Image (spheres, grey):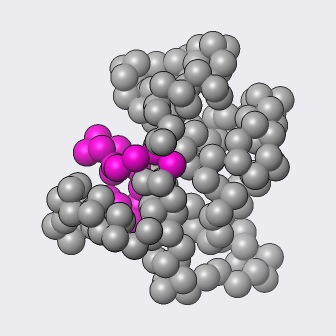
Amino acid sequence: MAISNQQLRDTFLTPQMKCYFEKKLPALCSVELEIRIEETLKFLNIAAYCVGSIPVSKEIDEIWHFWILETREYERLCQAIQGRRFIHHSSNAYMNCNGDVVPSIEDELEQQAALLGTYVLNYGPFEADRVRFWTLAAHLVDNVGWSVEHLNEWLGSIL
């Protein structure tokens, strides 16, 4: 059974963190803010399976950054989600400076496709207003011309 957006908010988003995000992002309407928080929670909840580049948009990365700044709340969240470990955030630029090998484009695409499949398994099919937050899904819809329905069918076929 898919985890609902409401279940994610009820389980992981405290009233204090909701208030905090409202103060940090006052230009966003409450619906848009909730969507971004939900998609961030989905990403962080499946991040245990993520290697390589971050597969989400700048808007989701921004929510993640704000959460990280509240270190106690972020640590509590990391202990509650899948993997039950602190999720570190490093850029590809830093990885290169550190001598780490950045995965190839082919490996990145395979990894991102697997994460999108994990998304569908955990949260159900992509909704049209959420595709834009996942870089590979957005690329397939916006640049390749897939419909959201086609994206969901493809993800269902690779599971």
Q: Whole-percent x and y of residue 158?
A: 40, 73
- Residue drawn at 76 percent across, 41 percent down: 78
On screen, residue 140 versus residue 44, left or right, reads: left
Residue 132 visible, this angle: no
On screen, residue 52 versus residue 85, left or right, reads: left
Q: Quadrant of residue 52?
A: bottom right
Q: Is residue 21 above or below residue 106?
A: above
Q: Nearer the viewer, residue 122 or 87?
A: 122
Q: Is residue 156 magenta?
A: no
Q: Quadrant of residue 9?
A: top right
Q: Nearer the viewer, residue 98 or 145?
A: 145
- Residue drawn at 48 percent across, 42 percent down: 1
- Residue drawn at 35 percent across, 44 percent down: 130
Residue 153 visible, this angle: yes
Q: Is residue 90 above or below residue 4?
A: below
Q: Is residue 131 magenta?
A: yes
Magenta stretch in the rendered image: 122-139
On screen, residue 127 versus residue 116, left or right, reads: left
On screen, residue 47 versus residue 58, left or right, reads: right
- Residue drawn at 44 percent across, 27 percent down: 33
Q: Whole-percent x and y of residue 40?
A: 54, 41
Split into 4 quadrants, where in the image is the C terminus?
bottom left
Q: Nearer the viewer, residue 72 or 69?
A: 72
Q: Whole-percent x and y of residue 98?
A: 80, 76
Q: Whole-percent x and y of residue 85?
A: 82, 49
